DNA sequence: CAGAATTATTGACAGCGTGTCAATAGCCTG
DNA sequence: CAGGCTATTGACACGCTGTCAATAATTCTG
């Protein structure tokens, strides 16, 4: 496919016409042009395809990325993509799943000081990790009307994780009463944090200090509100 | 097509084989079965197709709605959809565009009192209008799949409008310095408001009073932060 | 009111993208 | 080196999209 000098062409069943296909697609991690095809471990191949898919899905929207594109990028037959991931949607879901989990947090390392101090530390940690991982995580929550239930579930799951960590850091975890309300409020706040970080990292309209101030100030209010609700 | 007893079949250009297609699609607003087809005003037909598309897009995600589905729902040939809207994407964009603009606001009617009072009034108005229009507007900002640049632009446009109104209501409109930063902060806040409203109306995890308190409290902080940034 | 003119509406076509599956060809083992 | 295991291929059937000439439902005109 990628190799240019493939002689036989082996006319399958019906001629189907010549149709001079001229893939000008550059395969990023596949084999070199003209090289004989290589047989990899399932894990390796799977990982390779996954990486290519991840890169492509980060560049253009879901439906603009064809399975053919992914296969071409990996230097592989299109059927192999389906073989390893079932269908395109599942592959996409796996990409989303892996990119939607915010990196590990060292909640235990948070200071035991005032609420204000813990808030500052949390926000600092949040912004630090975001600055490190780049904007990959941020792009996820903004899409239009997609509303795919599966994608939504994955994102909600990731959000729940963030909420859990946040509550732990704020010392709101233990209480039994009003747990659901507090969780909801934290969920709302996480959206705010995500949005604020987007202004800082993606749009570059706010400085880090400004975002920090904004997030810390609002978090204080939200936590007080949450505490009052208990 | 929908009419069962269509005799001639009139083989158009090349026979192409029978291929007994059997649409079992129910047309919602189209003509009754067996009725002769009706020729409408372009505006009427366009509106009818638009309505069907809106309903379908609200039910399942973009790519799960085929142009065939829309046409069938309208009781119309598929080609007509393309005739009126160019392609499926444009039709979709028009649906999003119409559903993403938050209803008119009577900013002028806001009281001239304290900041706190104006904030309360704004939040009240915001929640009122949302309660009235139902959750249609809310579903937009949550999907993770789309990431279509055009969709995103439309949503950003709508967001800008909300921000403008909010700044007007908060008395932050006039200043020339730091306008961009203030706008960014308001943008962040609008996301929070949207998210809070979602918890109230869609998830039903928070009461209206709780959301009100949350939004009012955070808005105060944001406005103070914004004012400090000027 | 009949016939012409206008144009809303249809239906078929070509092309692409997807998922499936038998056939093929690398690599490893005996 | 033969033989088996299985990673990998390639073609097929089918659905969806956009285009366009043909058609038929109106309206206009004498």
Image (cartoon, coloured by chain):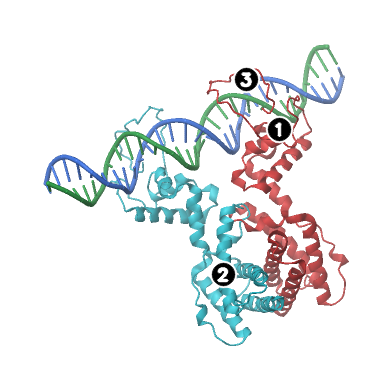
Chain colours: A red, B cyan, C blue, D green
Measured along the vertical axis of the image, is residue B58 above or below residue B5? Answer: below
Measured along the vertical axis of the image, is residue B124 above or below residue A149? Answer: below
Q: Looking at the rendering, which quadrant does residue A122 occupy? A: bottom right
Chain ID at mark 2: B
Residue name at image x 81 percent, y 58 percent = A104
The numbered mark at residue A9 is: 3
Chain ID at mark 3: A
Residue indicated by mark 1: A75
Q: Looking at the rendering, which quadrant does residue A6 occupy? A: top right
What kind of element bears circle 1?
loop
Quadrant for the N terminus of chain A in the image: top right
The numbered mark at residue B162 is: 2
Labels 3 and 1: the sequence-earlier one:
3
- Circles 2 and 3, Cβ within 8 Å, touching? The answer is no
What kind of element bears circle 3?
loop
Q: Looking at the rendering, which quadrant does residue A174 occupy? A: bottom right
Q: Nearer the viewer, residue A81 or A230?
A: A81
Q: Residues within 10 Å of mark 1 (few under 14, many from 20)?
A: many
How far apart are labels 1 and 2 at the CA level?
A: 47 Å
């Amino acid at each position: 496919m990628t190799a240019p000098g493939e002689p036989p062409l082996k006319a399958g069943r019906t001629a189907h016409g010549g149709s001079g296909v001229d893939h000008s697609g550059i395969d990023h991690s596949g084999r070199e042009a003209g090289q004989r095809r290589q047989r990899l471990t399932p894990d390796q191949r799977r990982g390779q395809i996954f990486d290519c898919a991840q890169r492509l899905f980060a560049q253009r929207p879901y439906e603009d990325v064809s399975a053919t594109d992914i296969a071409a990028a990996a230097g592989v037959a299109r059927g192999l993509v389906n073989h390893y991931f079932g269908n395109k949607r599942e592959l996409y879901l796996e990409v989303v799943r892996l990119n939607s989990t915010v990196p590990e947090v060292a909640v235990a390392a948070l200071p035991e000081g005032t609420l204000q101090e813990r808030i500052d530390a949390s926000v600092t940690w949040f912004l630090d990790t975001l600055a490190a991982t780049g904007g990959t995580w941020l792009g996820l929550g903004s899409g239009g009307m997609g509303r795919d239930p599966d994608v939504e579930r994955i994102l909600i799951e990731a959000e729940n994780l963030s909420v859990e960590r946040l509550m732990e850091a704020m010392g709101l975890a233990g209480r039994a009463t009003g747990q659901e309300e507090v969780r909801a409020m934290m969920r709302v706040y996480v959206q705010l944090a995500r949005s604020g970080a987007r202004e800082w990292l993606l749009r570059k309209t706010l400085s880090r200090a400004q975002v920090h101030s904004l997030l810390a100030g609002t978090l204080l209010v939200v936590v007080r509100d949450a505490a009052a609700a208990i």
